Image (cartoon, helix red, strand yellow):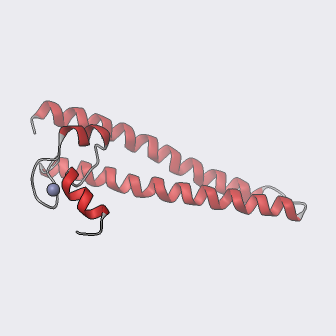
């Protein structure tokens, strides 16, 4: 992959990383606030634990994504960014456009989704 493209994807990855870090710390804060809010009756308690569960789930997703993004940035440093970690072919441009932190090319991702990898 040429340097210009790497720079372009790096910018997108860094922007995503920043956004995710903000979301993760925000949902942790919201979780704490949900804890601190005084709950008077059962209905309140139920909705409070629902909110917490939702926030935790959401921040799990964001953390996982954050992990993928930092791995992609690591691959950039090692010069293997844009290369499928399975078949070592170049990952399709349109796939990287959609998912800049993709580890697999479209074919290998499909195989993985089907549990073949
Ligand atoms: Zn592949």
The foreground one among 86 and 73 is: 86
Tell me where residue 53 sits by quadrant: bottom right
Quarter in which the C terminus is drawn = bottom left
Residue with the most extreme front position: 114
Query: What residue do we see at 17% from left, 43% from top?
Result: 92
The percent coordinates of residue 11 (x first, y second) are 29, 34
Tell me where residue 97 sits by quadrant: top left
Classify the position of ligand 1 by quadrant: top left, top right, bottom left or bottom right. bottom left
The percent coordinates of residue 31 (x first, y second) are 65, 56
Please determine whether, in this image, residue 113 is positioned above or below residue 82. Answer: below
The percent coordinates of residue 104 (x first, y second) are 22, 55
The percent coordinates of residue 94 (x first, y second) are 23, 38
Please determine whether, in this image, residue 49 is positioned above or below residue 94. Answer: below
Quarter in which the N terminus is drawn = top left
Residue with the most extreme bottom position: 116
The answer to whether 60 appears left or right of 50 in the picture is left
The foreground one among 97 and 71 is: 97
Tell me where residue 100 sits by quadrant: top left
């Amino acid at each position: 992959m040429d340097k210009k493209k790497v720079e372009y994807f790096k910018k997108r990855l860094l922007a995503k990383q920043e956004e995710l870090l903000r979301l993760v710390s925000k949902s942790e804060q919201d979780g704490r606030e949900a804890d601190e809010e005084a709950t008077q009756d059962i209905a309140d308690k139920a909705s409070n634990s629902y909110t917490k569960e939702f926030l935790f789930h959401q921040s799990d997703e964001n953390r996982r994504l954050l992990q993928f993004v930092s791995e992609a940035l690591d691959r950039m440093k090692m010069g293997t960014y844009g290369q499928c970690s399975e078949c070592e072919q170049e990952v399709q441009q349109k796939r990287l456009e959609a998912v800049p932190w993709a580890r697999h090319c479209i074919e290998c991702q499909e195989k993985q989704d089907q549990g073949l990898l």
